[in-house]
Image: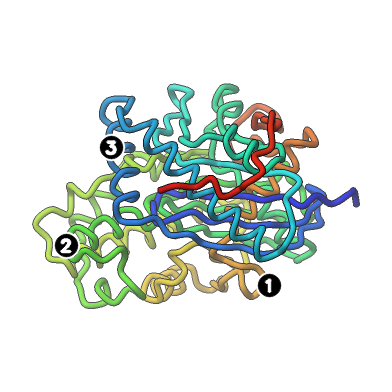
Amino acid sequence: MGKTILSLGFMSGTSLDGVDAALIESDGEIVVKPVRAVFLPYSSAVQDLLKATIEDYQTKGESPLRAQASTVLTRYHLEAANSLIDTTKRMPELVGFHGQTVLHDPLRKISLQLGDPSFLANALGCSVIYNFRQRDVGAGGQGAPLVPIFHQALKGKLSGCCVFVNIGGIANVTWCGDGGRADSLIAFDTGPGNVLLNDWVKAHTGQAFDEGGQIARQGTVHKDVLASYLSHPYFSQPPPKSLDRGSFTLALCQGLSLEDGAATLTALTVRSIAAASPFYPESPTHFYMCGGGRHNTYLVEQLKTLLAPSRVESVEILGWQGDFIEAQAFAYLAIRSSLGKAISFPGTTDVCAPMTGGDQIIPQETICNRRMLVF
């Protein structure tokens, strides 16, 4: 057990709902102590700005909105950091800054995130680790998912095999075997998580998401549409593998009612998670859920049916905060990166050997007033 570091991690995910920020104390190995976490929602205008920027990158590979989106995004991150610092009265020694992914294409060795780590480093007066994915994709890896080594730390000394299921905008899984060996981890994106369902519901109702799955529960799954989605070659591709936010669209759902579209898209998420099971070396006894999708009770009911007899439970049963796992993970990855420890592995991103990642920015000047924040 080494010296613990107080680290601050961020996550602004594909759901575009806001920024998660979390403080942890960790040695970058088995000691992980959550301190506090906060969620700062984006305004509707900021959500629209980020979505437009991402759509530009998806279609044109660049965006005239990049600078504006990066500035606004970074200031939201600083406000979230201020909130944690003011509440805990503690300053982080290190920051793990993921930024906002606008384009992820490992075949072209591209994984691009927006945000200004230099501003954060100077404003907070501590080193910032960023650009976590680029070294991995540059080495021929998928660049995602990167959280599995943190999932392994969460598993701790639990015996047996388990799977961590993260349902954010994109859903991904981490299979953890018995014995706690990082080189045995298996991880990959399974398919759309909340992204298509959220976009569908917002387009039809103005609501941000299908709360509790109430809309989908009233609908009927269109099996032909579901089958068309599931015929995508991605689902039969062996892992490691990863997806971009734009890998799947709503085109196949056009013409469906609000309820039927929601039911069909929920079924897509559930079926694609269940379809990952043949890729596990051994059947897990437990599936531990994290991410916003675990709040969708209708979705979870469907998962429990398809994944039986394995138990499906939220990570809260392990004493963890399921809404902040990824933010905590990037705080943890920042520590590992600063110590030169591996953050990605052959079984998680398809790199040839375990490797570290991330670039480090050391503050050049400390801005005395952390509240240089104007929206």
**Residues under numbered marks 2 and 3 in contact, where contact means CB atoms less than 8 Å apart:** no
- CA–CA distance in space, label 2 to label 3: 19 Å
Sequence order check, earlier mark of 2 and 3: 3
The residue lying toward the viewer, choosing from 114 and 74, is: 74
Residue most extreme to the left:
255
- Under mark 3, the amino acid is Glu
- CA–CA distance in space, label 3 to label 1: 38 Å
Residue 79 percent across, percent down from the top left = 53, 53
Residue 71 percent across, percent down from the top left = 44, 38
Residue corresponding to mark 2? 204
Residue corresponding to mark 1? 319
Determine whether, in the image, residue 280 is placed left or right of residue 220.
Answer: right
Residue corresponding to mark 3? 55
**Residues under numbered marks 3 and 1 in contact, where contact means CB atoms less than 8 Å apart:** no
Could you say whether the residue bearing mark 3 is in a helix, strand or loop?
Answer: helix
Could you say whether the residue bearing mark 2 is in a helix, strand or loop?
Answer: helix
Tally of marks: 3
State how the image is colored: rainbow
Q: Is residue 198 above or below residue 219?
A: above
The residue lying toward the viewer, choosing from 29 and 25, is: 25
Residue at (34, 49) in percent of width and height: 46
Sequence order check, earlier mark of 2 and 1: 2
Residue at (27, 40) in percent of width and height: 52
| Location of residue 362 (image quadrant) | top right
- Under mark 1, the amino acid is Gly
- Under mark 2, the amino acid is His
Determine whether, in the image, residue 298 is placed left or right of residue 178.
Answer: left
The residue lying toward the viewer, choosing from 343 and 336, is: 336
